[in-house]
Amino acid sequence: MIKKIGQIMLYVNDQDAAVRFWTEKVGFVVNAEEDNGQGFRWIEISPSKGSETSIVLHNKEFVAKMSPGLNLGTPSLMLYADNFEEFRSLLEDRHVVVGGIVNMPSGRVFNFADDEENYFAVMEK
């Protein structure tokens, strides 16, 4: 049986720009990077070293050629933050597009966009 989510695949137009966004603005770290020398390159990032779940950044154009029927839209990611308001302020300070705080039955949430205008949500935990 499945016990946890290991990796989330995120298909991006510019892998280097995506790495810079996630590491420099959001504070993630690069865990691994692989390149087979034939155009297939992936970069694994996570909130911190040793995180149980990571995001793998794939080149959208390459994946589209290899798997033409694959849906390459952005997955809907919900990130959890302990220092919710501090993290939101940090993103704003780093000139990230950040939405307002919304009170949901499950807790407070805001969203932010990466440089390719993909939106992600953050919930207070």
Image: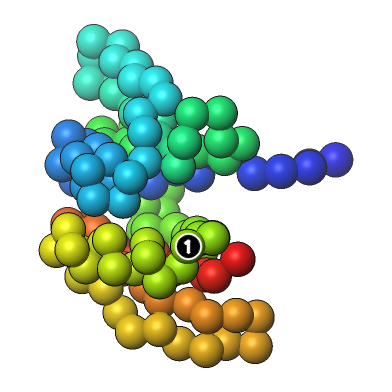
Q: Residues within 10 Å of mark 1 (few under 14, many from 20)?
A: few
Front one among 95 and 39: 95
Q: Residue at x 23, y 21 (%)?
A: 39
Q: State which quadrant residue 112 falls in.
A: bottom left
Q: Quadrant of the N terminus?
A: top right
Callout count: 1
Q: Residue at x 33, y 36 (%)?
A: 58
* Location of mark 1 (residue): 83
**Residue sticking out furthest to the right:** 1
Position of residue 63 in the picture relative to residue 52 (left or right) = left
Position of residue 119 in the picture relative to residue 21 (left or right) = right
Is residue 10 positioned above or below 122 on the image? above
From this viewpoint, is residue 119 visible?
Answer: yes
Visual colour scheme: rainbow
Image coordinates of residue 105 in percent, x first then y, are 65, 88
Front one among 103 and 67: 103
Q: State which quadrant residue 46 falls in.
A: top left
Is residue 63 positioned above or below 76 on the image? above
Image coordinates of residue 115 in percent, x first then y, are 17, 57
Q: Residue at x 49, y 29 (%)?
A: 49
From this viewpoint, is residue 69 visible?
Answer: no
Q: Residue at x 41, y 76 (%)?
A: 110
Image coordinates of residue 64 in percent, x first then y, are 30, 41
Label 1, secondary structure: give it: loop
Image coordinates of residue 83 in percent, x first then y, are 47, 62
> Residue flagged by tag 1: what amino acid is it?
Asn
Is residue 115 positioned above or below 85 on the image? above
Is residue 87 positioned above or below 108 on the image? above
